[in-house]
Amino acid sequence: MSTPGGGFSLRHANVIILTDETEFARLLTAGWQTERQVPRVTVLTSDLWQERGAPARDLVVVGPVREGGLTSVLRALDPSTAVILCVPTDSKELGQLRAKYPKLIHVPLREDWAQTLLLVAGESLRRVEALRLARQAERAAAKNENHATLGRYMLDMKHSVNNALTSTLGNAELLLLEPGQLSSQSLAQIKTIHSMALRINEIMQRFSSLASEMQEAENTSQAETEGAEASASQRH
């Protein structure tokens, strides 16, 4: 089973085979062993299945279970779980299951079920990975937007902060010009205030420098993009 684009490996996937038929689990596991990439597989019976205590998984393959066990097994599954169902079922029952479990895929239990299931499982796992990466990208975008908002706020407040620092430094320096009027403890405290104000001023200066560098880089990038677009337009 190949991995288009090389971005996803089945070796990183977790699969649960949930069945009461040992032969079903053996054939499916043996089929995966012949592939170049093998997911981490856990085999559980319907009696052992518990949603809360289940191991991490990207896909649940439900095979034949004891009579009356399918309903309880599926009821214990989260509706958002990716499920491949490989059990005998009629069209009405299958329609009801698909309505409740949007990610459920049915593979008929016929002669070529194992090979079909392996192919479907590979595509299902790739879809799960794609959704996971999309969610990561959304979280990263939201985090970057928060950082951008903070950066814009700091730029907006830069003038006010510089004014406050100038006032703090000026008053501290005036007090330090007349050390005889201060106790030794007060003098030490004023020196600390002066020193920390200078440190904050250095940080603000560095922030201003970074903001200018980033703006310059953005302007350069925009100019290069516009130049490339103009060049392409002229060629056409």
Image (cartoon, rainbow, N blue to C red):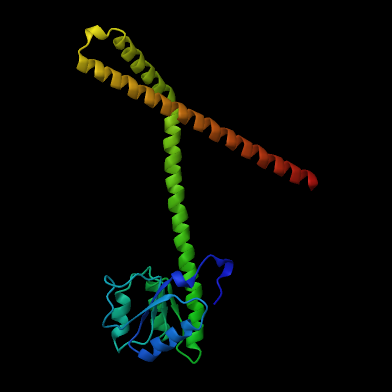
Q: Is residue 215 visible?
A: yes
- Return the x and y of residue 91 as percentages of the image width and height: 43, 84
- Say whether residue 59 is left or right of residue 180: right
Instruction: Using residue 85 as the reference point, say whether residue 226 is left or right of it.
Output: right
Seen at 46% across and 77% down, the residue is: 38
Q: Quadrant of residue 159?
A: top left
**Which residue is found at the position 41% from the left and 21% from the top?**
162
**Residue 157 visible to an observer of this rendering:** no
Residue 187, given in percent of the width and then of the height, sits at: 25, 15
Above or below, comparing residue 227 to residue 207 in the picture: below
The percent coordinates of residue 215 (x first, y second) are 55, 33
In this view, 188 is above or below 210: above
Residue found 56% across the figure and 67% down from its top: 6
User: Quadrant of the rendered structure where residue 23 is?
Assistant: bottom left
Q: Is residue 21 left or right of residue 113?
A: left
Q: Residue at x 49, y 92 (%)?
A: 111
Residue in the foreground of this view, choosing between 233 and 44: 44
Which of the image's four quarters has the N terminus?
Answer: bottom right
* Residue 33 location (% of width, % of height): 47, 82
